[in-house]
């Protein structure tokens, strides 16, 4: 068994005489007057002032539906299981984000091969309920509604070994979409046809209906339409015999 010893120490209130009390009040008044005339604080007066953050700041995520190829990479890589792919009327699948789970690691942004997910500088968002924290695809396309009170941007810089606070009278751009290096467009191709066992998993998995099945002399054959293939790679992942691969267009 563990034994625990508790010690109690009584804290004594300092007994100040009248001179010390008056001196303490005078020092406080002088310090306050000096700061009012010659302020040396580096405190940001938020929300009237907003600190400038770099373009790679990991804030709220926006979505460009025109660049999405429904590859599910964002959902696969998310360590918090915050991204769910939802079917759309056009037969494609697009991401939704549950911000009750999201840890803002931006693995999804870095992994997206076509740059469909974009980082913003928006971070101070309030929700009235847990349900509102689930962002649908439609809500990801446009930035959230913002009530702005700031008119000054604060930047910190080092000058001669000193930390300098610089105030600039401008409104910070929070929805900036930095340039993202996009991977080359790819196409699914049959690299090893001798491995194919005609399981049709590629046909069943393809979200863009680019793979068709034909029966010739009692054998199944598969064709990939390059016009429909988006290079999402889902068929490559599902192929159990490594028959398919992705090649550059």
Image (cartoon, grey):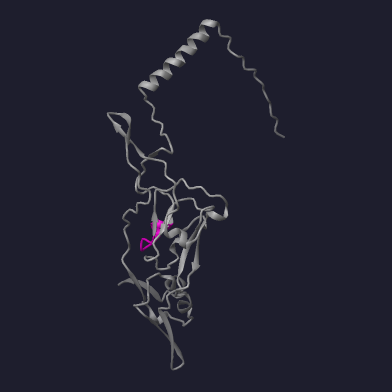
Residue 76 visible somewhere in the drawing: no
Across and down, in percent, residue 68 comes to 39, 66
- Residue 152 appears left or right of 97: left
Going 42% across and 41% down the picture, which residue do you hit? 149
Count of number-bearing discs? 0
Task: Give 81 or 129, whichever is nearer the viewer.
Answer: 129
Q: Which residue is depicted at the point 45% across and 58% down?
A: 140
Image location of residue 235, percent across then percent down: 43, 73
* Residue 208 visible, this angle: yes
Out of 81 and 179, give the one closest to the viewer.
Answer: 179
Q: Nearer the viewer, residue 21 or 220?
A: 21
Q: Position of residue 215 (x, y in %)?
A: 44, 90
Residue lying furthest left: 160
x%, y% of residue 45? 42, 34
Furthest residue in direction right, as rendered: 1
Name which residue lies at 42% across and 74% down.
242
Q: Is residue 183 left or right of residue 4?
A: left
- Residue at 36% x, 21% y is 37
Q: Is residue 10 left or right of residue 202?
A: right
Q: On screen, 91 above or below 152? A: below
**45 above or below 33?**
below
Tell me if residue 86 comes above or below residue 29 in the rendering.
below
Q: On the rendered image, what quadrant is the C terminus found in?
A: bottom left
The quarter of the displayed image where residue 234 is located: bottom left
The span shown in magenta is 108-116
Please identify the quadrant where the N terminus is shown: top right
Q: As drawn, which residue projects farthest toward the bottom? A: 217
């Amino acid at each position: 068994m563990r034994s625990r010893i508790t010690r109690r120490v009584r804290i004594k209130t300092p007994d100040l005489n009248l001179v010390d009390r008056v001196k303490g009040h005078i020092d406080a008044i002088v310090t306050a007057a000096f700061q009012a005339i010659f302020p040396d604080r580096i405190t940001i007066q938020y929300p009237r002032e907003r600190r400038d953050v770099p373009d790679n700041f990991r804030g709220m995520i926006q979505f460009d539906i025109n660049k999405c190829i429904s590859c599910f990479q964002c959902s696969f890589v998310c360590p918090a299981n915050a991204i769910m792919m939802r079917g759309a009327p056009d037969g494609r699948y697009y991401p939704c984000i549950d911000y009750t789970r999201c840890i803002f690691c931006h693995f999804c942004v870095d992994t997206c091969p076509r740059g469909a997910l974009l980082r913003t500088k928006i971070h101070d968002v309030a929700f009235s309920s847990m349900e509102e924290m689930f962002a649908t695809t439609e809500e990801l396309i446009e930035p959230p509604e913002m009530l702005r009170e700031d008119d000054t941007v604060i930047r910190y810089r080092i000058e001669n070994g000193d930390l300098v606070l610089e105030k600039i009278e401008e409104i910070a751009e929070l929805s900036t979409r930095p340039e993202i290096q996009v991977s080359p467009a790819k196409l699914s191709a049959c690299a090893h046809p001798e491995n194919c066992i005609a399981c049709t998993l590629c046909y069943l998995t393809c979200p863009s209906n680019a793979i068709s099945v034909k029966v010739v002399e009692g054998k199944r054959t598969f064709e990939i339409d390059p016009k429909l293939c988006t290079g999402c790679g889902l068929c490559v992942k599902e192929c159990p015999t490594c028959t398919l691969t992705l090649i550059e267009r």
